[in-house]
Each structure stands twice: as C-alpha cells, then as structure tokens.
C-alpha cells in the first residue's frame, strides 16, 4: 500500500479538526502560554522600570550642582599673565560652552535650556563692622562672593533701586542683592560693603538695588550657592564648638567681570550642565560613568584643555552621584537573577510537563498515524503547526499585555523572553511525539516502581549532580555582594531542587514496595489497592514532581531572602542601639536618672555603663573603648540582646590585688598576648591601671563597632578609689523592655540631662524600613517570584491529577459496581496519589532546609536590607534565614489541595452512571 500524501489543505483541515476536538485543552494551553509569556516579558520590564525610577529619584533629590556636569576655569593675573580679561567675557564663556556641547555623546543627556554659566570671585572676608556676626568664641566676620551671570535683568524683579552698571575698576564695583540677603545682612540700596583678600587688597561693593527672583525654582538661581539668601557656615574648632559665620552673594553685571581680577585669587569661571532626568536609564549607568570619566580625565578632557589650559570638568556632581547607585544596583542584580532563573525554570518545567502529558494522552493517535504511513517529519510538522497556531498568538498577546502594563525604555529583552516561551510551547509536543513514535514499540506499562533507569539516564544524573556541586561551590566562594553571580550560580537553588527530585525518584519505589507488602496482609482492600495503584503510577511522574519541587524551592528561597532582610534589619537595630533604648552623653549621667528611667512605662531593667573611648595599652597602638560595668546586670543585657556569647560575669569580680580582670575583644586580647602578655597597663579616665585578660567576646552591646576592654566597676574601684566619685559614674544607660514609651523616656531624660542622646531600637528599626525604590523594587520582584512559584506549583499538581482523571474515574466506577462504598472510594482516590504528593511536599521541605546553609555564605542581602550610601553597624546580619511559614505552608497547602480535589472527584463519580464512566475510561 502506497504511503498517503498529506497535502497542505489537508494539514489545515487536520489542525482545525484537532483544535475543535479538544476546545477545553486548547484554551487551557493558550491561557498557560499567555500567562507564562506575560510573566517572562514583564519581569525584565519590571526590573528596568524600578531601576530607572530609583535612578531618577536619586538624581532628582540632589541639588542642581549635585546632579550637574560642572566645568570650571580658574583665572587670575598670575595664572594667565596675558589678557586674562578676555577669558571672562560673555562671548568667551559662550564659545567654551559650544566646544563642550560638541563633546557630549549619548548616553549623557543634558538639559541645554537649563545650562548656567558665569563668573564668581573666591570667598572673601567682608570687613565692615556693621555686618551681622554670629556669637561664638571667634566672632568670625561674614564672607561675601561676587557673581556675574548673563541675563540678570531677565531673571530678576527689581524691588528697590536700579540694576548695576558694568563700569568699575580693580577697587570698586556695583552690585545688587536679593531681598532676603538684604534683610539678613542689614543692607539696602545705596549701602556699601568691603571685601578684603589675603594680601590686604580691598574692593568696595556699592549696592545699587534690591531684587527678587522672577522664578526661584529655575537653574539660574540654584546652580550657585547663596544666590537667593545667605547661609550659615561653620568653621571647625578643635577642642570646642564650631565657629559659625554668614556667607552671602552679590550680583554684578556680566560685563564687569574684569574687576574680579583685582582680588589676589582672581575669578572662577563655571559652567553647570544639569542632567536630563527623564533621559536617565539604569542600564546606561556603566556607559554613562565611562563617558563622564572621559570628560574628567580622558580624551574628551584632553580636547577641552587643548582649547584652554586649566579648563577641567569637576569629578563631583553627577559623576559622584552615580557611584552609590551603581554599587547598590550591582549588588542587587544577582539576587534578582536568582529569582528570575527560579521562576523561569518553574515555568519551563510546567510547559514541558503539559506537553509531555499531552503526548502521553495522544500516544495511540501518533502510533495510528505512523501505521497509516505518515512520515516522522510530516507528523512533527503537523504538530509544530498545531502548536504554533495556539502558542504564537497567545505569546504575542502576553507580550503585548506586558508592554502595555509595564512601560520601560527597553523592549528587546521582553520580546526575546516571550519568543522563548512561544518556541518552547511550540516545539515541546512535536519533539516528545517524535521520541514516542520514532519506532514501533510494544505496549507495556512503565510503572515508576517497576521501571529500571537506563545507563544513559544514570550518567546524565551524575553529570547534573557534578554541575550542581560546582554551582554551589562557585556561589559560596564568589558570593553575590560584588555582583559576581552568573547564570550558573544564580541557578544553584533550582539545580538543588532538580538533584533532590532525581534522588527522591530513585528512592520512591522502595518505601512503596515495603508498604504494599505490609498492607497486603491486612483485611480490607482500600490500603492494599491504594498502594498498588500508587506503585503503578507512570514514570512520567518525574515531570510533575520536578515542577512541584522547583516551585516550592523558589517559594521557600524567596521567603528565606525576605526573612533574612527582616532579620538583618532587626540585628542592625539592636547593634546600633545596644538594647531596647539607650541614653548616652559624653560625661557622667546624673545618679538619679537611672531610677527615673526605670519608672518609664515599658522599661524592665536599666544597666549603666561607663564608656571611655580612645584608650590604649601602654606601648601598643590599638585603640579601644574601656567599658566599666556592673557584671551581673551587664551579663543579663548581653543575654537579652544576643550581642556576644555567654558573658562570664563571675570572672570580672574575682579578687585581684594589683591587676584587675578584664574581658577583651579578640584584637585587644591578641595585643596583650603579643606585646605585654596577659598583664598590661591601660590608660583610663582615672589614670593608669593594670589589667589581666580573663576572657574574650566577639561583640558587646556597649561598643558594637569598636574594639573594647570590659572591667568591673567594683574591681576598678579597689585599685582606683576615684572611680566611686559621681563624676566617674555611668555615661550610658541601656534599658530593656517591651513597648517602651518614647515620649515619656525623652521627657524624663530632658529634665535630668538635657544634652543626653536618646535612641530607641524601634525607631532605629523603622528607619531601615524606609527603603529606596531600588530596594523596594527588588523586594517586589521576590514577592512576585514567591507568588508565581506557588501558582505554578498548584498548576503542576492539577495537571498531574487531571491527566489521570479518566482512568481514575473508570476505576472508581468499576469498584462501585463491585460494591465499594463512597467513603472507601474517596480514601482509595486519596491514597493512590498521596505518596506522590507527599514525595513532592517532603522534597520541597528538604530542599528548603538544605539551601539555606549551603547558599548562605554566597548570598549577601545587605543591598536589599540597607542603603549603599549609608553604612550601617551590624549589617553583616543580613543573611539567608529559614522562614517556617514559606517552608511549611506551601507544602501543606499542596497536600490539602490534592486530597480535596481527589475526594471531590471520587464523590462526583458516584453521581454518574457506571456505564458512562466505564465507557469514558475505555475511550481514554
């Protein structure tokens, strides 16, 4: 018999017939592909969206100079001996600006209409006695700056007097000041003040008018400091309080810049170029930083300096602003990649599982077509066309939905991700069918208990185990803190789940066989028949089990990440405060303050500690904090906070005639051992004392971020009686309790010690909760990963149950005709699938318990818990933590859901005719 020809029109009609034959399955497949394509396209766009938002928020919060590319040129008669005035004219400034704009290349985008350039003098002392001075030890005079920016008349509104004329000489100039400057500095139109440089040259500045900004928010008024109003500046004063003084600015005509050369230091020409915030994208940050580096010290900078020597682009501003953001983004990217790989793996496994179950259900159809003469290529082509008709439009719809709902700059990654989903959904069924119908085989059962794994499968499994071991080792060694994770290390959690699935599938037949043999001796058919049916589960159970394990792993890993972030913040708050509340001052606190703090609602115990910072061992250079404590209360404080191991309070109060016992940090203890032995002379606030190291502590509440040496106040008082004086009392109080009233605590402290600092652990913890858009976006990705993993886990379970539903219904119908009750049929249906469901739940819990210690060393959560721009004490506590809810609840929910679905299915079977169910089973 000749092989029949399958024409194109026949193919189309065959595809149409196949889709109409199973409309429910076609719609379910389309929905699965649509949701998966949407998630695949939405993930990169969501990441791009929150990263771009975080970058733009970071830049928008900065001042205008802080988000600008600033160019400057110092001009004086000494640095430019020939015609320096020519460099300060408006024409010269515009020409230099034009040369700079020629060097601006993408991704650097600047707001050209907001560019501000001009000339300013160096800060100079205003010597007039009538100008206000801030009371201080030095009573410093104010300092003034002269600024010339083009378009003075267009940006100001004249309140009093007139605008300045450009005429002037090296010793005098006309200027205007703002109304707020005039009010603070007590100046008016017609007033004059004098600026004196370091060599004594005096310039007279005559105020011709008072102006107000037309639009205070524009860059013209914000590029340079103090244009709108004076500001207080503090000068450091070693050994005392800082000395403040006023700094103000006066505006001169832009054609009078030559007068600024009469001062010793000359003038500074500047160009501020604000970044275009809306054009900034996070993925362009590396290239943008390279472009800025080229302007500051690269070929672009060389071209600028070829036009004018000493012209340079400042390294501050936008270039400095991008550094912390890039570090935080780099640290967060590997964690996002771990979540993305996990969800992608779950989705792909579910797609392959759906194709595998469909191929198993249509196996007889493929064998029949092959028997009728269709070639393997023609069969594969038909199935490819059938899958493409469903998958391609569904994936396109999912992509379009993601592009519409999640606006972002880039679309290529989303398109490729959705295309990958469409390809997998299209080719998975034809490839599986080709493997099934490649050569005729006799029909035989492939029970999971009876089937023996081939050598090829054993080699593949061992290879996978080796790859997983390498990924885990690489992740532990390289970590994610420096952005060093790649695709292999990011897939470590998923690969752990795959290995666990392989191991469980290898072990699954043994307990099933043992239980079946044991229950065979019991009366009743439910247990025996249920276990027998469980053992006859097809070997395709591997895919549902793999999908369940991977999804549970993603869910538990996301929960571990979130739990680690919360735990890290809690640890950092306790480390920063040292207790639930802390009252601290530089000297000794009043003696009555401790009793007043104990009366505050919520306070359970108060511990006083004397902290002497910056102490040293004689003849050694290791600085440390000397902590004078009451051993027993301090031991309880250590136990409550968990900062440090069990505190040996008894050792500190041991009798000592000359050297008092001390507990030291490891570095201080090594200093004693290497330089002075266990005994050493220590400088303290009461003089030199001899101490003897009797123990070490890795951490302590009273000195979380410094080296320390702890001694007993009673032991110190025996060798230094001055310690008993009130002036040497505790400088810090640590309060522990629950629900401490912050207002009452501050009220009690303000009455007894107004200068004391009050810190509460709850307030410190709340400050960590105010995360940046980058941190909150990464957290949302993890929450989405947890939700998607849970959803795919449920879907994998339902697919597995629905695949075997016709055979199960036929079996239950036959058992009903044989007299089995409805409750027995329900138990039988549950027992048939319960071992497989328990296998998946147990495997999920097992992988979740294993992944935390295995991956903890390589996953750094600091970028998610804290801001990179603000170093936090105790941030090292942000590591993976086992989260019991995410560990147990998804697995328990799967077991409950499976039992409920099977029980309902068994109950519904009894309401239909036995003949109908049996015939359905025969057709299946």
Image: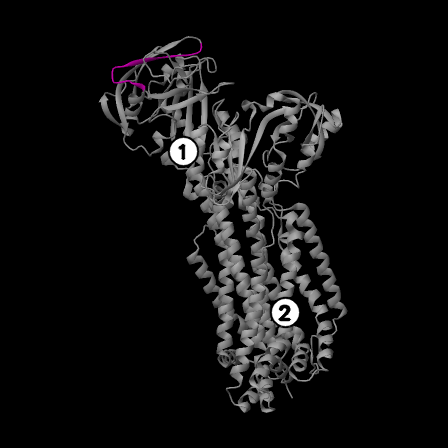
What x and y, as percent, mark residue 285? 51, 42
Q: Quadrant of residue 897?
A: bottom right
Examine the rendered structure and indicate whether residue 715 appears above or below residue 481.
Answer: above
Q: Earlier in the sequence, mark 1 or mark 2?
A: 1
Examine the rendered structure and indicate whether residue 802 appears above or below residue 226.
Answer: below
What x and y, as percent, mark residue 492? 65, 55
Of residues 450 and 319, the one nearer the viewer is: 450
The residue beneath circle 2 is 838
Of residues 822 and 198, the one nearer the viewer is: 822
The residue beneath circle 1 is 64
Q: Quadrant of residue 817?
A: bottom right
What x and y, as percent, mark residue 261? 40, 14
What x and y, as percent, mark residue 594? 51, 33
- Disc 1 to disc 2, C-alpha distance: 61 Å
Residue located at (69% from left, 84% from top): 523
Q: Report crowding for label 2: few under 14, some 14 to 19, many 20 or more residues within 10 A (C-alpha).
A: some
The mark closer to the camera, 1 or 2, is: 2
Q: For mark 1, give the secondary structure.
A: loop
Q: Which residues are drawn in magenta?
A: 185-198
């Amino acid at each position: 018999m000749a092989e029949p020809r399958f024409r194109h029109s026949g193919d189309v009609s065959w595809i149409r017939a196949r889709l109409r034959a199973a409309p429910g399955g076609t719609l379910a497949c389309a929905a699965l592909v649509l949701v998966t394509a949407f998630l695949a396209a939405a993930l990169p766009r969501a990441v791009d969206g929150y990263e771009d938002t975080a970058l733009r928020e970071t830049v928008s919060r900065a001042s205008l100079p802080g988000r600008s590319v600033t160019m400057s040129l110092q001009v004086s008669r000494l640095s430019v001996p020939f015609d320096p005035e020519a460099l300060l004219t408006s024409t010269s400034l515009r020409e230099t600006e034009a040369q700079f704009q020629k060097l601006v290349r993408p991704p650097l985008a600047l707001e050209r209409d907001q560019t501000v350039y001009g000339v300013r003098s160096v800060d100079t002392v205003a010597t007039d006695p009538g100008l206000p001075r801030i009371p201080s030890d030095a009573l410093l005079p104010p300092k003034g700056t002269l600024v010339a920016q083009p378009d003075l008349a267009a940006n100001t509104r004249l309140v009093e007097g007139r605008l300045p004329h450009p005429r002037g000489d090296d010793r005098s100039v006309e200027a205007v000041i703002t109304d707020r400057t005039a009010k603070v500095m007590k100046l008016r139109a017609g007033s004059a003040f004098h600026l004196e440089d370091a060599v004594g040259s005096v310039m007279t500045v005559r105020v011709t008018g008072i102006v107000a900004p037309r639009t205070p928010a524009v860059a013209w008024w914000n590029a340079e400091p103090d244009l709108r109003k004076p500001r207080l500046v503090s000068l450091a004063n070693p050994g005392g309080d800082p000395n403040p003084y006023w700094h103000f600015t006066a505006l001169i005509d832009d054609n009078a810049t030559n007068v600024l050369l009469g001062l010793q230091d000359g003038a500074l020409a500047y160009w501020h170029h604000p970044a275009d915030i809306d054009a900034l994208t996070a993925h362009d940050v590396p290239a943008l930083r390279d472009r800025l580096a080229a302007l500051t010290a690269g070929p672009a900078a060389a071209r600028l300096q070829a036009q004018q020597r000493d012209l340079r682009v400042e390294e501050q501003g936008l270039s400095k602003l991008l550094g912390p953001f890039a570090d935080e983004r780099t640290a967060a990217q590997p964690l996002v990649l771990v979540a993305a790989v996990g969800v992608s793996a779950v989705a792909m496994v579910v797609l392959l599982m759906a194709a595998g179950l469909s191929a198993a259900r249509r196996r007889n159809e493929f064998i029949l077509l092959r028997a009728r003469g269709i070639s393997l290529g023609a069969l594969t082509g038909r199935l490819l066309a059938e899958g493409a008709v469903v998958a391609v439009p569904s994936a396109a719809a999912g992509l379009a939905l993601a592009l519409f709902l999640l606006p972002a700059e880039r679309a290529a990654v989303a398109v490729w991700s959705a295309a990958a989903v469409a390809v997998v959904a299209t080719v998975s069924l034809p490839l599986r069918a080709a493997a099934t119908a490649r050569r005729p085989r006799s029909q035989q059962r492939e029970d999971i208990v009876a089937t023996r794994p081939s050598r090829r499968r054993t080699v593949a499994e061992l290879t996978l185990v080796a790859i997983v071991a390498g990924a885990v080792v690489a992740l532990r060694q390289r970590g994610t803190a420096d952005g060093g994770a790649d695709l292999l290390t990011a897939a470590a959690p998923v690969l752990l789940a795959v290995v666990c699935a392989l191991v469980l599938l290898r072990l699954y037949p043994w307990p099933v066989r043992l239980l079946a043999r044991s229950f065979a001796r019991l009366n009743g058919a439910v247990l025996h028949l249920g276990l027998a049916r469980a053992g006859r589960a097809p070997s395709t159970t591997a895919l549902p089990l793999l999908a369940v394990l991977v999804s549970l792993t993603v869910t538990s890993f996301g929960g571990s990440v979130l739990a680690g972030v919360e735990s890290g913040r809690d640890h950092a708050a306790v480390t920063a405060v040292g207790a639930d509340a802390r009252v601290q001052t530089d000297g000794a606190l009043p003696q009555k303050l401790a009793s007043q703090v104990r009366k505050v609602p919520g306070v359970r115990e108060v511990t006083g500690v004397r902290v002497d910072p910056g102490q040293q061992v004689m003849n050694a250079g290791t600085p440390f904090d000397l902590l004078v404590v009451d051993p027993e209360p301090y031991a309880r404080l250590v136990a409550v906070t968990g900062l440090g191991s069990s505190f040996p309070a008894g050792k500190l109060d041991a009798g000592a005639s000359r050297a008092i016992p001390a507990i030291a940090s490891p570095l201080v203890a090594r200093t004693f051992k290497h330089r002075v032995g266990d005994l050493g002379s220590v400088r303290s606030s009461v003089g030199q004392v001899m101490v003897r190291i009797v123990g070490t502590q890795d951490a302590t509440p009273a000195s979380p971020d410094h080296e320390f040496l702890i001694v007993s106040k009673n032991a110190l008082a025996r060798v230094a009686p001055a310690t008993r004086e009130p002036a040497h009392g505790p400088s810090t109080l640590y309060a522990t309790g629950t629900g401490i009233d912050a207002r009452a605590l501050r009220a009690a402290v303000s009455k007894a010690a107004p200068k004391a600092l009050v810190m509460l652990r709850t307030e410190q913890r709340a400050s960590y909760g105010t995360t940046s858009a980058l941190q909150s976006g990464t957290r949302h990705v993890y929450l989405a990963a947890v939700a998607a993993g849970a959803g795919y886990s449920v879907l994998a379970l339902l697919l597995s149950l629905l695949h075997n539903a016709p055979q199960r219904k036929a079996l239950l119908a036959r058992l009903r005709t044989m007299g089995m009750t409805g409750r027995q049929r329900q138990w039988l249906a549950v027992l048939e699938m319960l071992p497989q469901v328990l296998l998946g739940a147990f495997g999920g819990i097992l992988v979740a318990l294993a992944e935390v210690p295995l991956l903890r060393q390589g996953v750094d959560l600091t970028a998610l818990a804290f801001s990179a721009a603000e170093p936090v004490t105790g941030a090292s506590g942000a590591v993976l933590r086992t989260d019991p809810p995410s560990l147990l609840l998804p697995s328990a929910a799967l077991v409950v859901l499976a039992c409920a679905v099977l029980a309902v299915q068994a109950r519904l079977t009894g309401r239909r005719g036995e003949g109908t169910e049996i015939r359905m089973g025969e057709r299946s």
